Image (spheres, helix red, strand yellow):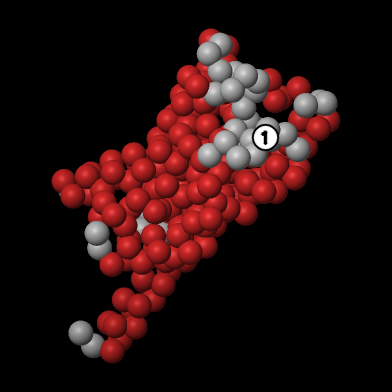
């Protein structure tokens, strides 16, 4: 390959990487913008949107499986979820952007159903179940895939966020530990599912 061909190839790969990063930024930014806008609207409505959270063992509460991750009790709650969502969400995308949608979908379903089945009384809202799903996925992927990049990323995530795993236990009143626990389990399930799918392909 000539020097000119090499430069052209590098240029194409750089442009492709830039497009991928732009796509990832748009996806993450779109999600974060949505939950922030909804919180401003919810404040204006006096917290009326929060009734769309998960209400355990109540049929109407099933709608919260879809809506709860987009709703928060206040701005402090929202800020606490925004930074880890952006960081861990991007880590999920590192290999393939499409992994983000699979992991998010599985986590929302498992976390939501778990909370609906055994959650404590009252409404459960917040993106923390999804965040714990990303944590579970990233920690488990190294185990299931057993390749150096995945293991290295698992170690990095464990170093940065490993302490958060205690959030799956009922240690803090008013916090939906059930959402954290089942979100984490959903992330592990997603890691297993994606590792098997990639092995087949």
Mark 1 neighbour class, 10 Å CA radius: few under 14, some 14 to 19, many 20 or more: few
Residue 177 visible somewhere in the drawing: yes
Rendered residue at 25%/63% (across/down): 147
Q: Is residue 54 above or below residue 11?
A: above
Is 72 in front, or is 28? 72
Residue furthest bottom as drawn? 3
Residue 103 visible somewhere in the drawing: no
Q: Is residue 122 above or below residue 105?
A: above
Residue indicated by mark 1: 173
Q: Position of residue 28 (x, y in %)?
A: 55, 50
Is 169 in front, or is 74? 169
Rendered residue at 53%/33% (across/down): 179
Residue 25 lies in what quarter of the image? bottom right
Residue furthest left as drawn? 200
Tell me the element at label 1. Answer: loop
Q: Position of residue 48 (x, y in %)?
A: 76, 22
Location of the N terminus by quadrant is bottom left
Q: Position of residue 142 (x, y in %)?
A: 31, 57
In the drawing, does residue 185 fall left or right of residue 192? right
Rendered residue at 56%/18% (across/down): 56
Q: Is residue 62 above or below residue 17?
A: above
Q: Position of residue 67 (x, y in %)?
A: 58, 27
Total marks shown come to: 1
Rendered residue at 60%/50% (across/down): 29
Residue 54 lies in what quarter of the image? top right
């Amino acid at each position: 390959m000539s020097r000119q061909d090499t430069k052209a190839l590098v240029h194409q790969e750089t442009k492709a990487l830039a497009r991928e990063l732009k796509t990832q930024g748009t996806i993450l930014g779109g999600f974060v913008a949505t939950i922030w806008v909804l919180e401003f609207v919810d404040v204006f409505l006096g917290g009326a949107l929060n009734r769309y959270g998960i209400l355990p063992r109540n049929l109407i509460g099933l709608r919260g499986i879809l809506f709860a991750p987009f709703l928060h009790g206040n701005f402090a709650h929202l800020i606490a979820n925004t930074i880890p969502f952006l960081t861990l969400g991007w880590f999920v995308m590192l290999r393939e952007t499409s992994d983000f949608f699979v992991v998010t979908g599985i986590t929302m379903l498992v976390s939501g159903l778990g909370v609906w089945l055994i959650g404590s009384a009252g409404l459960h809202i917040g993106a923390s179940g999804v965040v714990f799903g990303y944590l579970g996925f990233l920690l488990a992927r190294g185990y299931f895939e057993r390749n150096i990049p995945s293991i290295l990323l698992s170690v990095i995530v464990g170093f940065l966020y490993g302490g958060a795993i205690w959030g799956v236990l009922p240690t803090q009143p008013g916090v939906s530990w059930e959402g954290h626990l089942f979100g984490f389990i959903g992330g592990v399930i997603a890691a297993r599912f994606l590792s098997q799918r990639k092995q087949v392909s």
